[in-house]
Amino acid sequence: MNFQNLELNIKDAIATLAIARPKKLNALNRETIQEIHTAFKHLKDQANVRVVILTGSGEKAFVAGADISEFADYNVAEGTDLAAKGQEIVFDYIANFPKPVIAAINGFALGGGLELAMAAHFRVASENAKMGLPETSLGVIPGYGGTQRLPQLVGKGRAMEMIMTAGMIDAKTAKDYGLVNHVTTPNELLDLAEKLAHKIMNNSSQAIAAAIKAVNANYEDGTNGFETEIKAFGEAFGTDDFAEGTQAFLNKRKPDFN
């Protein structure tokens, strides 16, 4: 597929999708938001893709935020639509994506950029990464799920402080907070993400998709996550992967989930 603002590479069942607007520090504009949706919708249907790594092109930024020049003159209705549509087609779409999504944070992940990283299933970061939600310094609040996902990841108090101060934290602090799982050098960032992707691919894609759904259910209003887990657990007994996994275990061999 051809994109104006993205770079997509697929190798060894791993899709690496990079936001590529280096002159704008990979800031998210409307066109990029739509392209991200198109890319993920495409990857969902690709049987040869089992894990997605989401990153930014260049060495300075993952995504430095939203492209403020596009919405500086929006009214209330337009601002509401901007957040609602973005959450629907990108941020919530990624959070509920049935294939694992790893965010590899290289450099700045601010505002919509941090919200994009938080929509991924987990995050790794380079030592030079800086993260924050600076929206209150612009007279607005995070609109792509930041007020919801940041407290889930770092706790209410830390999220309140980050949002109210509009400050940035470094990669080490982000790891201490639980915002990222691992920190490494910039040169080793994608290698680490790929290493984790290969570990994931040793396991059942069917089971992983069910686990993503069950974990997310815990954060959905009106949904009983335990019931979701029980239903998915039971359904697993009817899958080919369950038959392969159990037989491999009993016969003391590695399972083949391909």
Image (spheres, helix red, strand yellow):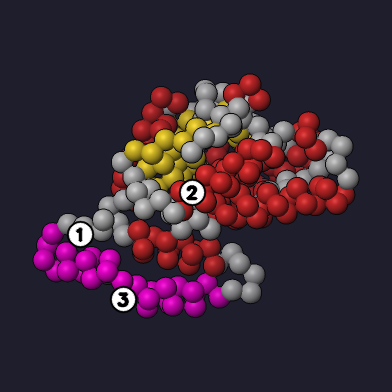
**Residue for badge 2:** 42
Q: Are marks 1 and 2 in contact (CB under 8 Å)?
A: no
**Residue for badge 3:** 237
Magenta span main SS: helix
Give the residue type that dot 2 points to: His
Query: Which residue is located at x 55 percent, y 34 percent?
Result: 3
Density class for disc 1 (Cα within 10 Å; few <14, some 14-19, many ≥20) is some
96 relative to 62, above or below = below
Which of marks 2 and 3 precedes in the sequence?
2
Q: Position of residue 216 (x, y in %)?
A: 53, 63
Kindly state the secondary structure of the residue where label 2 is placed.
helix
Q: Position of residue 20 (x, y in %)?
A: 56, 29
Q: Which residues are magenta?
A: 224-253
Residue 191 visible in the displayed image? yes
Q: Residue furthest front?
A: 2
Query: For the residues marked 3 and 2, what is the alpha-carbon distance in whole angstroms?
Result: 29 Å
Which of marks 1 and 3 precedes in the sequence?
3
> Which quadrant would residue 15 be assigned to in this image?
top left
* Image depth: mark 1 or mark 2 in front: 2
Dividing the image into 4 quarters, which one contains the C terminus?
bottom left
Please check the rendered image and state whether residue 239 is part of the magenta-colored stretch, yes or no: yes
Kindly state the secondary structure of the residue where label 1 is placed.
loop
Query: For the residues marked 3 and 1, what is the alpha-carbon distance in whole angstroms?
Result: 16 Å
Which of marks 2 and 1 precedes in the sequence?
2
Return the residue nearer the eye: 250 or 97. 97
Kindly state the secondary structure of the residue where label 3 is placed.
loop
**Residue for badge 1:** 255
Give the residue type that dot 3 points to: Phe
Density class for disc 3 (Cα within 10 Å; few <14, some 14-19, many ≥20) is few
